[in-house]
Amino acid sequence: MSERSERSGDVLVEVRDLKVHFPIKRGVLFDRTVGHVKAVDGVDLSIARGRTYGLVGESGCGKSTLGRALLQLTPPTAGQVAFDGVELTTLAPNKLRAMRRRMQMIFQDPMSSLDPRQNVESILTEGLQAHGIGGDRNGRRKIIAETLDQVGLPRWALSRYPHEFSGGQRQRIGIARALVLGPELIVADEPVSALDVSIQAQVVNLLDELQDNLGLTYLVIAHDLAVVRHISDTVGVMYLGALVEEAPSDRLYTEPLHPYTRALMSAVPVPDPDVEDRRERILIHGDLPSPANPPSGCRFHTRCPWAQPTRCADERPQLREIGGSRVACHWAEQIASGELRPHKVSVEITRPPGEGEEPSVVSAPTEPGSFV
Amino acid sequence: MALLDVEDLSVTFARRGQRTVRAVDGVSFSVNAGEVVGLVGESGCGKSVTSLAIMGLLPKQPGLQVSGKAVFDGTDLLQIDDRSRRDIRGRDVAMIFQDPLSSLNPVVPIGLQVTEVLTRHRGMRGEAAAKEAAQLLDRVGIPDPKRRLKEYPHQLSGGMRQRALIAMAVACQPRLLIADEPTTALDVTIQAQILELLKDLVQDSGTALVMITHDLGVVAGMCDTINVLYGGRVVETARRRPLFRQPRHPYTVGLLGSVPRLDAGRGERLNPIPGSVRDLLPWPDGCAFAPRCDRRVDACIGEPPELVLTHDGRSYRCVNPAPLPGLTPGDEVRTAVPGPATPGSVPAQAVPDEPPAVPGLAAAPSEEETP
């Protein structure tokens, strides 16, 4: 648990040992289950009310699945999710539906998450109707008008359709849709990665403002570390379905403890030539191993420049507290003090048993690249 | 004499019943051997069309007009016929595309796609070609290259596909490499690997590299000279350090202000550029950036701003640039080149991506408009 949430003592979301496993099916007549993709494999985290929790990691690490499982959009295989003290995983469907008003989601690509045949008013009214908020049409209109002001869209937007807006405005519609129900928690999955640089900043600022004004709690999922650092209070780093490090965002960036976090930090390009020339890159080799057949012990040991012959390969490290951060590494202290030096890692190819000529890595879905 | 000299390159797309789109509008830059030149800008600023025009890869369709010069080692790439262009392309000039999955042929094994280049340009066949292909894959850091040669693109991960694409591009040791958003589709750790690989290529073989990207961080680490594009024109050109330390054009200032930095604190507000890339003025009517600019003055509207060349080897296209400390405005100006103005066409950014389906429906509302 982070220091901050202990201090405020008001935890909105509590996730315990959450697992999401997807079965791998084979066969024509009988769907034999031949294994599981362990997209999320034992995650503990808690989000304090009014704070922002940032989740970073590379594509395929399970961060989006975690966000969806938290909202029960993907049923978790095991584990508990408590929202404001209410256990969601065992909640009856009608009660869960009522709870959804309090937790909303913002999606990555506003063009594919908005119905092209619905105008903005219809998009925003749908949720209100479903939850019976606002009474009659006029009451709803009032709520919608307020929401439009909050996200900085003009009133005439109501009668327009998504295609008539620019990318940044579409994302504002997506935010308005989440906001109109008056939620407490907003899960934002890559909210700015489909947008141009100058528009990104507008949306990031908007999310900041909304939090200040409405006291929202955010779970921000992104692959862009700079964006996550900018808007998060606490940042969790995921690798192959598990958290490897969790720390207050400033601390994570000044003192990364897990080897993976270090590598990640050193890989992010900074728009400053002086910083770029001075910095030392920790290059990690190879690709993400398959989540269907994760490495034994510490999942990062196959690519870790600090991997040790003992413990790393056979003992799975648990998150433990080291000076305000939570780190899942057996050797975090020794690495931080410089006692252990990085060594060169050669790429080894591991194949899941019985997979034949299948590649050893999951073809990660490409991150959005709409910058043509 | 530079290896590649692009001079006054313009690309217009005309379609019946629609306004002519001027995607690239008088772009000039040059690249020396062993130099990395960056073309930076947001969606629709013309950076990709520039590269496709140089490579002669724009679809041949009525209404497409390419003018200007792209002189590579004495030959104007825009003037030569297709046959000789094919000889140059792949051998002397090669390109790396943004999305490796859509630029590799999905039904042909990687090995065949790599050896195709070797057969076409180096006359290698059979065993020798396969051996060379394996060496190339090994050079770009693909483990177990012999086996990978037989695999299809979908069997490789994103980073590996991009490596395979780079292997194909460097197969004939080209003297000029054009990389169009080579890392946009990749994760940061893989991006770092690919950028390191490109840097090594430039250092080892003296290849000239044109780096097209929207990521200012990538530019800061890679490029020697940077051209910032907006609305199809180069609005600022500078060496790497001066550009990041003292950006002059308000658009460059705005871009740098809107990028969240890893080494900045939490809660510092970003300074975004207001509006969106669609709110622009056609160049002939003034500065395309003027509608979004916070340093706008009356002189911005009316005619396109001249290209101002300064004494420190920089240039910008702005009548009211961000001031330099310790210099009175205008002091450093060496000369000014008036910008070309062709009325009757609009830059690509002004055109919405999805034209309204209903005829007569208004164009996309701009973010600055008020009800």
Image (tube, coloured by chain):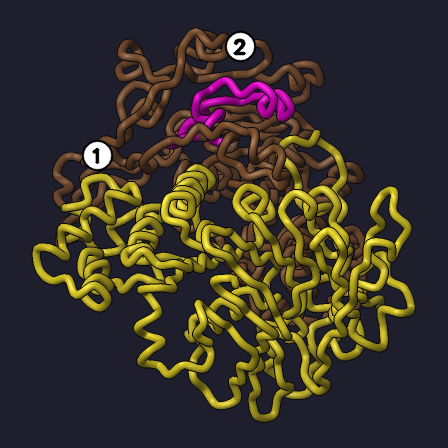
Chain colours: A brown, B yellow
Residue found 49% across the figure and 25% down from its top = A262
Residue linked to disc 2: A322
Q: Are marks 2 and 1 on the same chain?
A: yes
Judge by depth and name the residue closer to the eye, A191 or B67.
B67
Please indicate, yes or no, whether residue A86 appears anywhere in the rendered image.
Answer: no
Q: Position of residue A227 (x, y in %)?
A: 62, 40
Q: Which residues are magenta?
A: A239-264
Mark 2 and mark 1 lie on one chain; the one further toward the N terminus is 2
Residue A234, placed above or below residue B25? above
Label 2 sits on what residue type?
Ile
Label 2: chain letter: A
- Local crowd at mark 1 within 10 Å, few (<14), some, or many (≥20)? some
Residue linked to disc 1: A349
Q: Position of residue B125 (x, y in %)?
A: 11, 62
Label 1: chain letter: A
Judge by depth and name the residue closer to the eye, A155 or B344.
B344
Residue found 78% across the figure and 67% down from its top = B336
- Local crowd at mark 2 within 10 Å, few (<14), some, or many (≥20)? few
Which mark lies nearer to you, 2 or 1? 1
Q: Secondary structure at mark 2?
A: strand
Please indicate, yes or no, whether residue A356 appears anywhere in the rendered image.
Answer: yes
Q: Secondary structure at mark 1?
A: loop
In the visual, does B279 lie left or right of B348? right
